[in-house]
Amino acid sequence: MNMAESTFTYIWLQIEKLDIEYWKWVAWMIYPVIISFLLPLVIPICLYCCAIFLHVYQYRRRLCDAYAHDFWDGARKTVAVFWEAQGRIWHGYEIVGLDKLPDTGPAMVIYYHGALPIDFYYVMAKCLLEKQRQIHAVGDNFLFNIPGFRLMCDVFNVSPGTVHSCADILKQGHILGISPGGVREALFGDEYYRVMWGNRSGFAKVALQTNTPIFPMFTMNIRESFRTPGWGRSSLRWLYEKCRLPIVPIYGNFPVKMTTYLGPPIFPTEDMKAEELAEKVKLGLEDLIKKHQKVPGNVLRALSERVLWKEKVS
């Protein structure tokens, strides 16, 4: 190695060393700034947890009765109160039309699937606490492979759902919740709120077999609370169709205003085909979206609605 090469090597090593030392210095300078902004967040988080605890506590008598009545009933209602409080505090959550669901007998709820179906959790909680009815639900297969989720699915009667098993649930007189769009609609839907059912009509076959009324359900701003990125959708869609796993990143949890609307019941008739009934329900759901959702959805507008919302609902 000649003198020029050795000199260049020495200078390059010094530059690399300087870069390392420089970034160490930058990190040392900004750590206090980062910590100074993060530490105050501990207080709002603690206050938020306290608020939820107090909401749970105000149901103490009802929960005590539930724990005395059935092994899992108390646990279900405790979790339901938690979600009811979380929705009320974070989203100002309200529901319109819960009274439309029957107090007894079978019913089917068909809903639009957001990136995360937290609105359906809120509806399950409201129905359990206010109508004393537990909604059974159809969940995607991957849920049952997540560690710790199988017990929760069993306690809250979430199952993969076949035509036969769904028909049995309705014949037993329960309420059944289904999102025909499923994970595909959750991950690849967008702010235009297009219903993505494809040719799925299994729920309609079940309704025809059991003569069960169907209630379309939609939640305003559900896609503004949690969102999926718009980049790389075609590649991610191709990958999802191959592996059927929810590999699309989700971001958000914005405290937007959320209101759930239950449409009027749609009754199957003997002369109907499954495809016709499915299309009728789809039109009913699209009508709810058209009536209650401004498209394209906008996070800032949805946040402002959280503050300015005036409608009084039950």
Image (cartoon, helix red, strand yellow):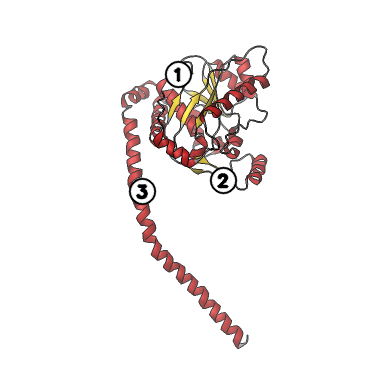
Dot 2 or dot 3: first in sequence order is 3
Contact, CB < 8 Å: mark 2 with mark 1? no
Q: Which mark is residue 41?
A: 3
Q: Amino acid at mark 2?
A: Pro
Dot 1 alpha-carbon crowd within 10 angstroms: few under 14, some 14 to 19, many 20 or more: few
Q: Amino acid at mark 3?
A: Leu
Dot 3 alpha-carbon crowd within 10 angstroms: few under 14, some 14 to 19, many 20 or more: few
Q: Is residue 70 visible?
A: no
Which quarter of the rendering shows the C terminus? top left
Q: CA distance from mark 2 to mark 3?
A: 26 Å
x then y, percent, for residue 195: 60, 31
Q: How many marks?
A: 3
Q: Amino acid at mark 1?
A: Asp
x then y, percent, for residue 146: 53, 39
Position of 268 with respect to 86 (left or right) is right
Q: Which residue is located at x 61 percent, y 40 percent?
A: 245
Q: Which mark is residue 312?
A: none
Q: Is residue 97 above or below residue 146?
A: above
Residue named by callout 1 = 99
Position of 12 with respect to 37 (left or right) is right
> Element under label 2?
loop
Dot 3 or dot 1: first in sequence order is 3
Disc 2 or disc 3, which is closer to the eye? 2
> Element under label 1?
helix
Residue named by callout 2 = 229
Q: Which residue is located at x 45 percent, y 41 percent?
A: 254
Q: Which residue is located at x 59 percent, y 19 percent?
A: 167
